[in-house]
Amino acid sequence: MRPSFLLHPPQSTLDRAKRALLSSVLTPDATQKMVSSSIPLQGFIGEPGKQKGYTQRAVGLIEVEDELLWLIRVGVLRREVDGQGITNSFRLTPMGIRICEELGFAWQPAPLAEVMYDWLLRRLPY
């Protein structure tokens, strides 16, 4: 039997995950695709990532990795797994899907104050 917090995470967990998503460089189009299929790490990088509609701007490898790992830590994303183990592709978690559905897969980037708060949370010990 699963603990109830897995099925119904606390509101603070949902708020932190939503703030992280809205503060990230990911677009609603990217998250909508990650509901049914994974996107490889390389798909987010640079100008091609922006042209595909996965990121709001051209983003370098280190920044993309940092963004994706943070979204994994807060429960929005997960790494795809194949028969040989973990891959470099990413999908939404059930909580990530829930948040995106609540937002209607359409949102504006977070206000600067929210982005700064999210930045600070990333640097604090978990």
Image (cartoon, helix red, strand yellow):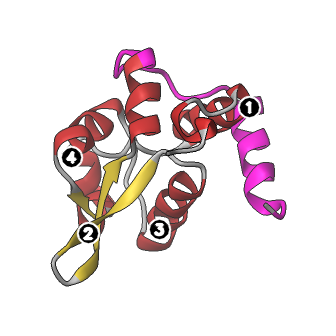
* Residue at which label 4 appears: 51
Q: Amino acid at mark 3?
A: Glu
Q: In the drawing, what numbered circle is on residue 54? A: none
Left or right of 51 on screen, residue 17: right
- Real-space Cα distance between discs 4 and 1? 34 Å
For the residues carrying marks 3 and 1, which lies nearer the camera in this image? Answer: 1
For the residues carrying marks 4 and 1, which lies nearer the camera in this image? Answer: 1
Chain-order first, disc 1 or disc 2: 1
Outermost front residue: 1
Chain-order first, disc 3 or disc 2: 3
* Residue at which label 2 appears: 81
Numbered disc 3: secondary structure: helix
Numbered disc 4: secondary structure: helix
Numbered disc 2: secondary structure: strand
Tell me which residue sits at (51%, 65%) in the image: 63
Image x and y of residue 2, in percent: 52, 45
Tell me which residue sits at (21%, 54%) in the image: 38
Residue placed most toward the observer, 11 or 20: 11
* Residue at which label 3 appears: 65
